[in-house]
Amino acid sequence: MKPAEFYQRDRTLQPPALTPDYKTSVARSPRLAMLSLQGSLSEITGPTFGHSDIDPIDNDLIKNYAKSGDPVGERIIVHGRVLDENGRGVPNTLVEIWQANAGGRYRHKKDSYLAPIDPNFGGCGRTLTDADGYYFFRTVKPGAYPWRNWVNNWRPAHIHVSVFGTAFSQRLITQMYFEGDPLIAKCPIVATIPDQRAIDQLIAPLDLNAAVPLDCLAYKFDIVLRGRRSTLFENRLEGN
């Protein structure tokens, strides 16, 4: 069976490329209209990953870089499902995360924030979803950190997430925020998103049912990718 193209993204929920209050967007944003191209076979199929590509503790950021003990910080679980736009779980897809440590500092040579580097925390992890699209990470809650967008801007605590899906055109890179963080409403990056529903989808609610007593809290973050069309618009793929 020939692979079908994917639903087009709802761009009314996406932030515009140029948002001057988020100053970095000024240099990064294109000045011409986007092109609309039909998806080719290379974009609507692959890549594939196997369990041999993943180490058993790659999804445990408390252990996967530890040298002399556990990292400092509030221990948490981040879990959820990767779904297509029709609500079906996406199995065996690669989910990767990266984040700052509990003090708000990344393990990166260009991060000069005064918070210390944690010698037992690398800040990166990866896992494959199971047959139902479920994924699971154990980590520490990242700290907020300042950045020079304006004089005194701070990024809310967040975790970066990359998901490949079943095809290259489903590739998604996003950020997950934490329920109840007052910095979310004050973040210039979050403020570029025009629809509150889309913002709400980026905020992981506390999930006490998945928490481990006397060990760690849990946050649930479901990720929705572009789904496949059931019928073609006027029998033309470009209508997708």
Image (spheres, helix red, strand yellow):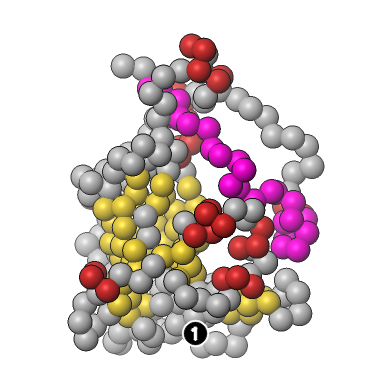
Measuring 51% from the left and 88% from the top, which residue is drawn there?
A: 116
Q: Is residue 147 visible?
A: yes
Measuring 39% from the left and 67% from the top, which residue is drawn there?
A: 205
Task: Kindly indicate the quadrant of the structure image that contains residue 115.
Answer: bottom right
Q: Position of residue 88 (x, y in %)?
A: 30, 40
Say whether residue 58 is left or right of residue 161. Answer: left
Number of numbered callouts drawn:
1
Residue range (magenta)? 3-26
Residue 127 is a magenta residue: no
Measuring 37% from the left and 60% from the top, which residue is drawn there?
A: 221
Return the residue nearer the eye: 113 or 135. Answer: 135
Secondary structure under the numbered disc 1 in the rendered image = loop
Say whether residue 231 is left or right of residue 209. Answer: right
Above or below, comparing residue 195 to residue 100 in the picture: above
Q: Position of residue 155 (x, y in %)?
A: 59, 73
Residue 9 is a magenta residue: yes
Above or below, comparing residue 76 to residue 42 in the picture: below
Q: Residue furthest front?
A: 196
Say whether residue 193 is left or right of residue 197. Answer: right
Q: Position of residue 160 (x, y in %)?
A: 48, 62
Amino acid identity at mark 1: Gly
Task: Kindly indicate the quadrant of the structure image that contains residue 119.
Answer: bottom left
Measuring 47% from the left and 56% from the top, which residue is drawn there?
A: 201
Q: Residue furthest top?
A: 235
Q: Main secondary structure of the magenta part?
A: loop
Q: How many residues crowd around disc 1 within 10 Å: few (fewer than 14), some, or many (20 or more)? A: some
Q: Is residue 62 visible?
A: no
Return the residue nearer the eye: 208 or 60. Answer: 208
Residue at mark 1 = 103
Image quadrant for the N terminus? top left
Return the residue nearer the eye: 198 or 131. Answer: 198
Q: Position of residue 180 (x, y in %)?
A: 47, 75
